[in-house]
Image (cartoon, rainbow, N blue to C red):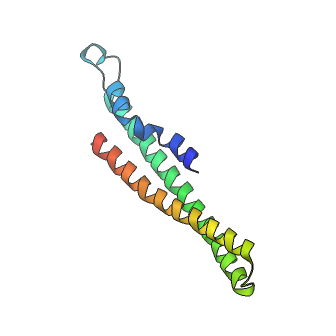
Amino acid sequence: LQELLRVMRTIDDRIVHELNTTIPTASFVGKVDPGQTCKELYQSLMDAHTNRERIIKNCISQTSAVVKTLKEEREKAHEDAALLKQLRKEQTKLKLMQSELNVEEVVNDRSWKVLS
């Protein structure tokens, strides 16, 4: 998940570069429509943010379901060390995904501040 998000955050990491290459210099003003180009950049950024948030929330939902199931199994088998280990692993994964949602918010805010 983290590697996928890193790749998907490329547009945010390169927002300043994208803006610099989107806004034409004086010699290119007649050849490029800066309004249309900025609109396309804005839409790309919106799509990227929406897709990443959807992916993270989907992973959180799936992992939450696994944690719930493991907790139910754990209540039935109190002494199962392997089950406890798997539950802890899934709980850790869930916390990581929830923190990624917070990171996503920070990344998005930073990009919108640069764009506006």
Of residue 89 and residue 68, the one placed in the foreground of this image is 89
What residue is at 57 percent from the left and 44 percent from the top? 3
Q: Residue at x 53, y 47 (%)?
A: 5
- Residue that appears at 28% across and 45% down: 113
Is 2 placed above or below 69 here?
above
Q: Position of residue 53 (x, y in %)?
A: 49, 55
Q: Relative to the observer, which residue lies in front, 40 or 103?
A: 103
Q: Is residue 33 visible?
A: no
Q: Depth check: give the residue in front, 87 or 4.
A: 87
The percent coordinates of residue 52 (x first, y second) are 51, 51
Q: Residue at x 64, y 72 (%)?
A: 67
- Image quarter for residue 42? top left
Whether residue 35 is visible to the viewer of this picture, yes or no, is yes
Q: How many marks?
A: 0
Pinpoint residue 17: horizontal percent, then vertical percent: 36, 29
In the picture provided, is 76 more to the left or to the right than 115? Answer: right
Name the quadrant of the C terminus: top left
Up the image or down, 59 lies above or below 36; here it is below
**Which residue sits furthest top?**
27
61 sits left or right of 45 in the view: right
Answer with the quarter of the image where residue 79 lies: bottom right
Q: Is residue 44 above or below residue 61?
A: above
Residue 40 lies, with reference to residue 89, above or below; the image says above
Horizontal and vertical percent position of residue 104: 43, 53
